[in-house]
Amino acid sequence: MLNGMKNEYTLIFPGGGQGNARLERILEQASARLGQPGRVIEKVESLDALQNCRILFAVSLNEWGMNLEWMQMLEKIRRQPDLLEGCVGAVIVDAPSELYTKAAGREAVLAANMSGCLFPGRPLVEGTASLYNFHTQAGLAGCSLEEAYLKAAEDLVSRLLSFTGIRTEKRTLYQTGAAAPEGKENSRLSYDPGCSGLPKLLVLHASIRETSNTFRLWNMVKERLEGRVESREISLQNGAVHDCVGCPFTACMHFARQKSCFYGGVVVDQVYPALEESQGVLFLCPNYNDALSANISASINRLTALYRVRPFFDKLLYGIVVSGYSGGELVASQLVSSMNMNKAFLLPPRFAMLETANDPGSILKVQGIEERAAAFAEQIVHQMYA
């Protein structure tokens, strides 16, 4: 349960403004409209007693993407795996450079998430040197780039303050003009398609079942979900997934309104309908060259058409990442940026299980793997029924 009133949050602002007048100005204007933070933390020594609260991380980088006070805070968050237990977070990163803001943002989200912090969909706002990343938003709103930046920051803080729990986010958000289910015409935000029967978890993979350590680890988790969560596995193997090539917006919207995509295939025929009826999605991600596999990446890209007409704020995101040598956090970060930051999936606390195993079957010999698989399954069950 989140502490405090809905208009209270903690601002983590490492090092203060550090000469970044623009970020200070954005925070001041957002606070003037939405309420002052109940607590401001600028030094790592004050980074404590944070459980069960709303947190806005506001990180000001220098030209080379660094903030030394934030680096110390990041170390403390990683060192204390329950420091942010029960928290819900959002992030603003500002820099006098066109680089590093996204990298710093997803690093912050992953570290805080592994320390117990939940992140609603689209939890990051970036202020690059030129603010050109707000070019489209400014054009649509008929305002300056900095005004668009401020609007995005205000929207982020507003969503942080309005978040009351996973159950709220899991409510179906019907599109304007869409028909509500029979008997639910006057409750557009309260109908939950998963209210009857077991909650559904979609599992996407491109693994060879017989040899994949990632798939064997999933089987360990699945055994502990049986009878409590209904899982559906969809294979994306053997070149079945065409990648998105960036159709013109009007073409993409044409197919999106039909809940389809120009390329069709397994993504449209199987993934789209399964995702719509599921409360969460779990990606099985063997670490290939410190990146998501090609078919997993392509399927994520192809979700854009469905996302245009059906927001994913109510969908829980999970991942199982197995690396042969190292780098699992890099793959997990890609899930964070692609699915949580861009596709707006809800990132529950400790969303990913990260393990290391190389030889086929060696995952079964990893010390403590049974206990961690059981704990991950229990977490999924708890969050699915939240």
Image (tube, rainbow, N blue to C red):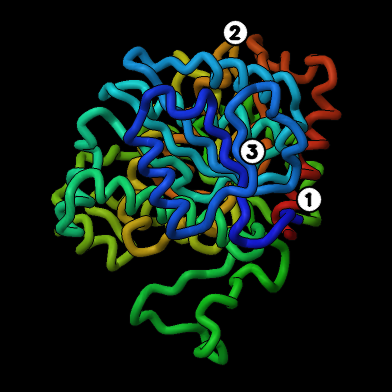
Which element carries disc 1, helix, strand or loop?
A: loop
Position in image of residue 376 (x %, y %): 75, 37
Q: Mark 2 belongs to which amino acid?
A: Tyr
Q: Secondary structure at mark 2?
A: loop
Crowd around label 2: few <14 · some 14–19 · many ≥20 (10 Å): few
Q: Quadrant of the N terminus?
A: bottom right
Cβ–Cβ below 8 Å for labels 3 and 1?
A: no
Give the camera-side residue of 348 and 281. Answer: 348
Q: Position of residue 354 (x, y in %)?
A: 65, 24
Along the polypeptide, which appears first: circle 2 or circle 3?
A: 2
Residue 226: mark in rendering: 1
> Are dots 2 and 3 in contact, CB under 8 Å?
no
Q: In the image, is 338 to the left or to the right of 275?
A: left
Residue in view at x 36 percent, y 54 percent: 268
Q: Which residue is mark 3?
A: 351
Camera sees residue 216: no
Viewer-side label of 2, 1:
2
Q: Which residue is mark 2?
A: 325
